[in-house]
Amino acid sequence: MKIGIDIMGGDFAPEEAIKGVLAYLASHSDSGIGVHFVLIGSPDIAAPYLSLLDGYQSHFTLVPAATVIDMHEHPTKALKEKQDSSIAIGFGLLQMGKIDAFFSAGNTGAMLVGAMYTVKAIPGVLRPTIASPIPKLDGKFNFLLDVGANADCKPEHLVQFAVMGSLYAKHVLKLENPRVGLLNLGEEEGKGNILAQTTYPLLKQHSGINFKGNVEGRDLFLDNCDVIVCEGFTGNIALKVAESIYNIFTDSRKIQDEFLDQFNYEIYGGTPILGVNAPVLIGHGISNARAFKSSIESAINLVESNFTNILKESFAENSSGAA
Amino acid sequence: MKIGIDIMGGDFAPEEAIKGVLAYLASHSDSGIGVHFVLIGSPDIAAPYLSLLDGYQSHFTLVPAATVIDMHEHPTKALKEKQDSSIAIGFGLLQMGKIDAFFSAGNTGAMLVGAMYTVKAIPGVLRPTIASPIPKLDGKFNFLLDVGANADCKPEHLVQFAVMGSLYAKHVLKLENPRVGLLNLGEEEGKGNILAQTTYPLLKQHSGINFKGNVEGRDLFLDNCDVIVCEGFTGNIALKVAESIYNIFTDSRKIQDEFLDQFNYEIYGGTPILGVNAPVLIGHGISNARAFKSSIESAINLVESNFTNILKESFAENSSGAA
């Protein structure tokens, strides 16, 4: 398996990216490493850190990329103009099948646009989506989607998010018969904005998912379902509120708590773009070595579970997917 | 000043409602009590608790109400059919000017519908709104609106929320030149769903508010603005995520923290319906005596600040309001 990593992406690249790769390699015996890393970035900038990987020479290849798409560049414009950037080259490798998954902690928009225009949406998938785990009090996670790729959605998009989220929960997270909740402002059927009101009956009648009804903001951290669907505007805000809890209580309030530790994004690292023809994962801009290592594990998991093919088959059988 | 209280509303009514009134009265010297309470509810059910107010007979009147609108009844239907309910009678008193403000911890929908159909929206106000304080790390509060009254909004609604929220922050919360933020999934202008993208320039060009641009989910607890506007779907979910933090970390995780204590709704009690022709406040269904006392204080504050007239004048001068 070949995992492509944009070592120029993120605030602490390339140092933390390379240290993340090292952390992954160091945690496995030489024969236990079933992955070859394709590190994409500037050889000059990476040089001081690449020596950290001495001893693991056979486990990685450096693919040179002359430029980087900065965090605040316009995604479409940057991808078009910077074809020698680490993200553009990464997608090129993925499209040609030279890597099996691609991860970057760089410009999220560029990763989304790159995924849409190179590996492209799986036939039948209307809107690829970004999902994020949200820690639950019982130690497990809710899988929230969409968290920002699709700010305006139609009911049929949310139905597909439910299907893709269910398939991910089942095949990648290994949850049996994952429960789907519709994020809403009230529990009862009929509550909500027009989108939620219209989506509810579609989810209810969908035979391919285990729909449990509406869930509210207060259910985000509870074990009332496994997959929570919403449009990306609300999902992004709910996610960022949840993420800020960790910073506020850990950093500002100096609270130590096991549940709070689960909010640390470093432990789950990258989040997948679901619905495109190859495994693509996006990381936090502030990713450190631990987050890179977690993201590598997520990428391997995604490839090993054969998730892309599972999605393809599901949407080939049925235009609304079958979880 | 006469404050009307639905003593039948809420999970712990009438006991906690009456104990809340008692707590308010007991915290003031007899001559310092500038308010007369109009308690609305069933004399029979309230009887065992009314004796708690012995010694304060001159400070309250009981107005009998034969029925109660339950928490899960359909608001419009219930208000129509139960004209002898504590909520219906409360709105009748408010409409006739027999009370200066009305508070209930009962059926939120019925309170909203009652406010809209009896005291009605202030001329020029397109959509009355519910706002909620959100604690900030610096000990102050962000004022978030709408939090659920208006699940689907147009840009002009959000502009009015910004105006009403600014006026409330200025005149009731006594903040000078309150800063307005638009809740969004990114900081830059142009980010967001169609609603946020369209609302941004309207807020930017509005001379009556101090617009500071977009704020994200992670800004909810920070001091980057004072008033945060959004449609009621996202606002409700953000609020409930925030509220659940208190329950999760205090009750389930047994964490003691001063900032966390600020999330306890009991300290700020009821939340006003902004934009109707008289002060109306809604409380949490789980309101206890402390929450009732806080709500009484909020109601008094709202009446004393003459907020309803300030709103009326603002919207009379200018159809989009002038903060």
Image (cartoon, coloured by chain):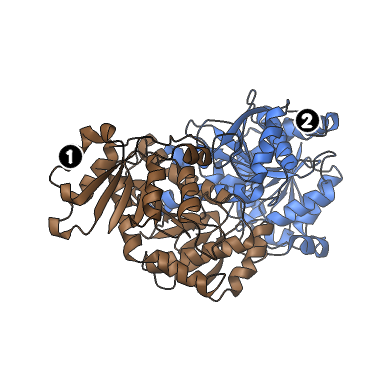
Chain colours: A blue, B brown
- Residue at 38%, 54% in the rendered image: B94
Residue B95, given in percent of the width and then of the height, sits at: 40, 55
Residue A78 vertical placement versus B247 (above, below): below
Sort mark 1 into few (<14), some (14-19) or many (20+) by Cα contacts within 10 Å: some
Q: Looking at this view, is A89 or B202 the one in front?
A: B202
Label 2, label 1: how far apart the Cα atoms are: 66 Å
Which label belongs to residue B8? none
Q: Quadrant of residue B186?
A: bottom right
Q: Amino acid at mark 2?
A: Ile
Q: Amino acid at mark 1?
A: Leu
Which chain contains the residue that carries disc 1?
B
- Quadrant of the rendering where the N terminus of chain A is positioned: top right
- Residue at 52%, 54% in the rendered image: B146
Residue A32, given in percent of the width and then of the height, sits at: 67, 30
Q: Quadrant of residue A2?
A: top right
Q: Is label 1 in a helix, a strand or a loop?
A: helix
Residue B122, given in percent of the width and then of the height, sits at: 49, 62
- In this orientation, does residue A78 appear? yes
- In this orientation, does residue B225 appear? no
The reply, left or right, for residue A244 in relation to residue B54 is right
Q: Is label 2 in a helix, a strand or a loop?
A: helix
Which chain contains the residue that carries disc 2?
A
Same chain for the residues at labels 2 and 1, yes or no? no
- The residue that disc 1 covers is B52
The reply, left or right, for residue A213 in relation to residue B18 is right
Q: Looking at this view, is B275 or A298 the one in front?
A: B275
- Residue at 73%, 64% in the rendered image: A74
Q: Looking at this view, is B31 or A48 the one in front?
A: B31
- Quadrant of the rendering where the C terminus of chain A is positioned: top right
Residue A239, given in percent of the width and then of the height, sits at: 57, 47
- The residue that disc 2 covers is A310
Q: Residue most toward the right? A: A96
